[in-house]
């Protein structure tokens, strides 16, 4: 799987991943990433396995660059979807 283009910035003991949403081009970022998890992700580990402690929203930013508002707009749930 091709990785999303973005920047990884060291901030103290953790890292931040910054990118632009492919739908709206607004900034999207995930903070508080650990080096070991980043290394696993960059070597090909699936995002959900490399970052099991992150929210689905944060993992989506890492996987596609898309933040939750644009994801929901592009992939709306059907009206009869159970909540």
Image (cartoon, rainbow, N blue to C red):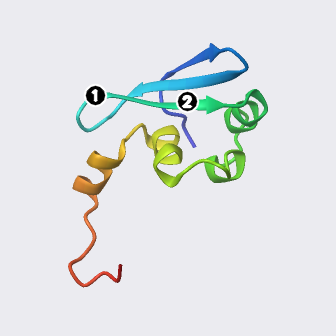
Q: Dividing the picture into quarters, in which one does residue 24 lie?
A: top left
Q: Mark 1 and mark 2: span between their CA atoms?
A: 16 Å
Q: Which residue is mark 2?
A: 31
Residue 21 x/y as whole percent: 33, 34
Asked if residue 6 is positioned above or below residue 56 in the image, the reply reads: above
Categorize mark 1 by other alpha carbons within 10 Å: few (<14), some (14-19), many (20+). few
- Total marks in image: 2
Categorize mark 2 by other alpha carbons within 10 Å: few (<14), some (14-19), many (20+). some
Residue 26: mark: 1
Residue 78 x/y as whole percent: 24, 76
What residue sits 22% from the left and 54% below the top?
73
Q: Is residue 47 left or right of residue 60?
A: right
What residue sits 54% from the left and 34% below the top?
3
Asked if residue 17 is positioned above or below residue 65 in the image, the reply reads: above
Question: Mark 1 against mark 2, which lies toward the viewer?
Answer: 2
Q: Residue furthest front?
A: 12
Locate the C terminus and report the quarter of the image it occupies.
bottom left
What residue sits 42% from the left and 26% below the top?
19
Residue 41 x/y as whole percent: 68, 38
Q: Dividing the picture into quarters, in which one does residue 39 lie?
A: top right
Q: Is residue 13 left or right of residue 3?
A: right
Locate the N terminus and report the quarter of the image it occupies.
top right
Q: Nearer the viewer, residue 15 or 78?
A: 15
């Amino acid at each position: 799987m091709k990785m999303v283009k973005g920047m990884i910035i060291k901030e103290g003991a953790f890292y931040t991943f910054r990118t632009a949403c492919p739908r709206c081009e607004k900034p999207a970022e995930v903070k508080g990433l650990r080096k070991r998890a980043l290394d696993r992700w960059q070597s090909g580990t699936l995002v959900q396995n490399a970052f099991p402690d992150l929210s689905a929203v944060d993992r989506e930013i890492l996987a596609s660059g898309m933040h939750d508002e644009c994801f929901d707009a592009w992939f709306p749930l059907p009206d009869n979807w159970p909540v």
